[in-house]
Image (spheres, rainbow, N blue to C red):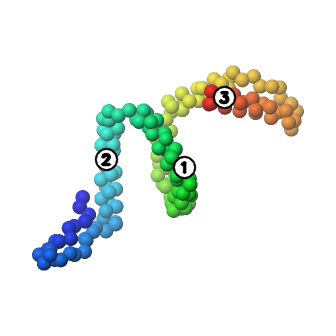
Amino acid sequence: MRVLKGSFDGFYGFLGLACCLQVKSADAVAAKWATRAGAAGADYASGVNGTQKDWATDTAAAAGSWAAGVQTAAANGSFAKGVNAAGTSKWKAKAANVGAARYPQGVAAAKGYYQNGISAVLQVLSGITLPPRGPKGDPSNYNRVTVVGTALRKMKTG
């Protein structure tokens, strides 16, 4: 795609004078991008499947860079700036119009991962012996919650 034309086209180029850059409209550029990028799903999958790099190893090795980037972004207030730049109306429109359409497909694709993850949680929960329940409103009932929370936290953190 050639968005910018050379400065020395046509008559002005003949005279050796610089001319204005000619650019396509934002509408035209965005329409072409959406058409081309929207049709690139197979190329995307091919790139993922064809890579020889080990994503997990390379990503884990970048942990320091990630942490430094997050710290810099936090110090600069980048998160809040990005949220404020997008605004609630963009979030709502994208969540309602894009997210809602993709949600069922994502849930279906994640069923096996969910099952594996929840199995560990259910196993921990099934092994808990709760202290006896006290009368309604008795503060000792919070001990039951603490036992569950402690067991699940131990599962997560080791």
From the viewer's side, name the closer residue of 24 and 65: 65
Residue drawn at (85%, 36%) of the image: 139
Residue type, numbered disc 3: Lys
Residue 24, disc: none
From the viewer's side, name the closer residue of 93 and 46: 46
Residue type, numbered disc 2: Ala
Q: Where is residue 99 in the image (x, y as percent from the top left)?
A: 49, 49
Helix, strand or loop at mark 3: helix
Residue 71, disc: 1
Residue drawn at (42%, 32%) of the image: 57
**For residue 125, side relative to residue 52 (left or right):** right
Q: Where is residue 56 in the image (x, y as percent from the top left)?
A: 43, 33
Residue drawn at (30%, 35%) of the image: 50
Q: Mark 2 points at which residue?
A: 40
- Image height of 137 relative to 34, above or below: above
Residue 24 appears in the picture as rendered = yes
Q: Position of residue 6 (x, y in %)?
A: 20, 67
Q: Mark 3 points at which residue?
A: 154
Say which quarter of the image contains residue 144.
top right
- Label 3 environment density (alpha carbons within 10 Å; few <14, some 14–19, many ≥20): few
C-alpha span from label 2 to label 3:
44 Å
Residue type, numbered disc 1: Gln
Residue drawn at (49%, 44%) of the image: 66
Residue 49 appears in the picture as rendered = no
Quadrant position of the N terminus in the picture: bottom left
Helix, strand or loop at mark 1: helix
